Image (tube, rainbow, N blue to C red):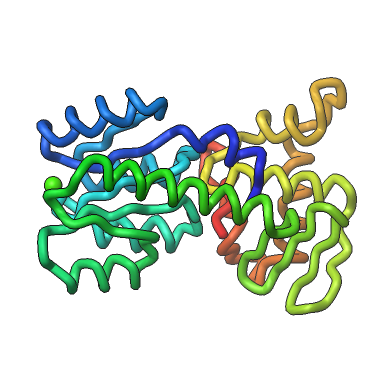
Amino acid sequence: MVPAIQTMSTKRILLVEDEPGLVLTLSDRLRSEGYDVDVAGDGESGLARATGEPFGLVILDVMLPGLNGFEVCRAIRRQGVQTPILMLTARGETTDKVVGLKLGADDYLAKPFDTLELMARIEALIRRSNGSAGATPAGYRFGDVVVDFRRAEVERGGAPVELSAREFRLLRHFIEHRGATLSRQELLNEVWGYDAMPLTRTVDVHVAGLRQKLEPHPKRPQYLLTVHGLGYKFVG
Ligand code: CA
């Protein structure tokens, strides 16, 4: 939905798979097609990467050590990360397909698969997610909040919310970097600019302001989270 991230991350693919042979074949093939490939060998690290960094696509195997692919998929979506997910399922397991799509996967492919087929699916998923970014007005929705970037307007439950220009820019920055932990210094640099020299406390005040206006329970935020000792993270 936010073109700035899409263009940056479109060619990055996260491959969550534990079989070394398949990892090797797939990552070679994907790289030869011009993709940047990152590999996670188990569910936990796959989840951490998928929710902490921007990717154009996640290829997620169902059978993984630790958290399985379904659990990873569900957790990624629960954290509000909308990256397209292609699940690799066991052959003939139609229940796998249904469960995967229900948990928020965008497509699935049964093993063993044809590499050409996989490439076609990948291209389609990435094109679709880019296409929807171009076609919809530059907006973002989380909970009952709707953000219109072009008109710099925010609505909550259908009613307009008054944000200061700085609060709006801060919110926009959070949305553009959703899922990532942002330090106070980084937010100051990006949202206030290097020359402004405000105090890091300024960030806290503005985050508190956004929570007050946008969170259902400002004291127990569910979108603008505090990451203790590090900064803030937007999930939504
Ligand atoms: Ca596997």
Q: Is residue 53 left or right of residue 198?
A: left
Quarter placement of the C terminus: bottom right
Q: Residue at x 26, y 73 (%)?
A: 98
- The image quarter containing residue 196 is top right
Residue 79: x percent and y percent?
46, 58
- Residue 173 visible to an observer of this rendering: yes
Give the x, y percent position of residue 15: 29, 39
Q: For this view, does 159 lie left or right of residue 216?
A: right
Please name whichever residue, 112 or 70, is drawn nearer the observer in this view of the structure: 112
**Residue 182 image position (x, y, % from top left):** 59, 38
How many numbered callouts? 0
* Residue 217 position within the rendered picture, expressed as x and y whole percent measured from the top left: 64, 71
Q: Quadrant of residue 119?
A: top left
- Residue 65 visible in this rendered orientation of the protein: no
Q: Residue at x 37, y 28 (%)?
A: 33
Q: Is residue 161 above or below residue 189?
A: below
Tell me which residue sits at (70%, 43%) in the image: 173
Q: Look at the picture and state if 96 lies above or below 66.
A: below
Q: Residue at x 32, y 31 (%)?
A: 30
Question: Which of the two residues, 131 or 81, is positioned nearer the viewer here?
Answer: 131
